[in-house]
């Protein structure tokens, strides 16, 4: 059973390999223009304040936008070396939380669990 093609442009795509080929082509053309997040490291907490520099496997962060996603509810504070219940932003488990950092800043978290940290990669200019 074939699916009728509604227009000349789409009809050509249907004849060239079907709607799946057209959808794949659109996806491949759109992906390079989208912004992406690149995994940087994991902050592991055991109920005390810890940063990306004091975690079990330390890592550095550059300036710009960074996203953090934790396995458990956490308190997060960007640009500081410690976080407490009175200073941190409450972030729910699984929530993607974005912060802006200057060069040399850290992300401090307070939780029992892990937080994955991502760096925001902007799309290339001109797209």
Image (cartoon, rainbow, N blue to C red):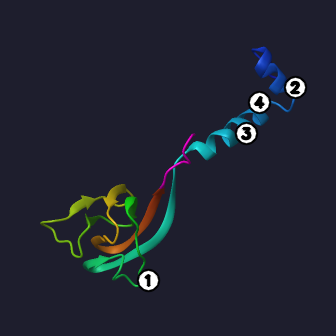
The CA distance from mark 2 to mark 1 is 53 Å
Please report the residue visible at 78 percent of the width from the left and 36 percent of the height from the top.
21
Q: Which residue is mark 1?
A: 57
Element at badge 1?
A: loop
First of labels 4, 1 by sequence position: 4
- Spot occupied by residue 42 in the image (x, y as percentages of width and height): 43, 73
Residue that sits furthest to the left in the current view: 86
The range drawn in magenta is: 121-127
Residue matched to label 3:
24
Residue in view at x 31 percent, y 70 percent: 105
Which quarter shows the N terminus?
Answer: top right
The residue indicated by pointer 4 is: 19
Give how far across and how far down residue 121 sits, in percent.
Answer: 50, 55
Count of numbered marks: 4
Report the residue that reaches farthest toward the top: 7
The residue sitting at 77% across, 19% down in the picture is 9
Distance between the alpha carbons at the discs numbered 2 and 3? 15 Å
Q: Which mark is residue 15?
A: 2
Compute the Cα span from label 3 to label 4: 9 Å
Q: Which mark is residue 107?
A: none
Q: Residues within 10 Å of mark 2 (few under 14, many from 20)?
A: few
User: Which of disc 3 and disc 2 is earlier in sequence?
Assistant: 2
Q: Is residue 86 above or below residue 54?
A: above
């Amino acid at each position: 059973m074939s699916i009728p093609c509604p227009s000349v442009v789409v009809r050509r795509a249907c004849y060239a390999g079907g709607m799946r080929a057209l959808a794949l082509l659109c996806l491949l053309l759109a992906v390079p223009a989208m912004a992406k997040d690149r995994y940087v490291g994991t902050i592991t907490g055991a109920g005390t304040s810890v940063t990306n520099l004091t975690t079990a496997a330390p890592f550095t962060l550059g300036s710009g936008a960074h996203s953090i996603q934790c396995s458990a509810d956490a308190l997060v504070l960007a640009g500081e070396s410690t976080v407490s219940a009175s200073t941190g932003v409450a972030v729910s488990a699984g929530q993607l939380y974005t912060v802006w950092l200057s060069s040399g800043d850290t992300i401090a978290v307070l939780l029992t669990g892990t937080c994955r940290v991502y760096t925001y990669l902007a799309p290339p200019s001109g797209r």
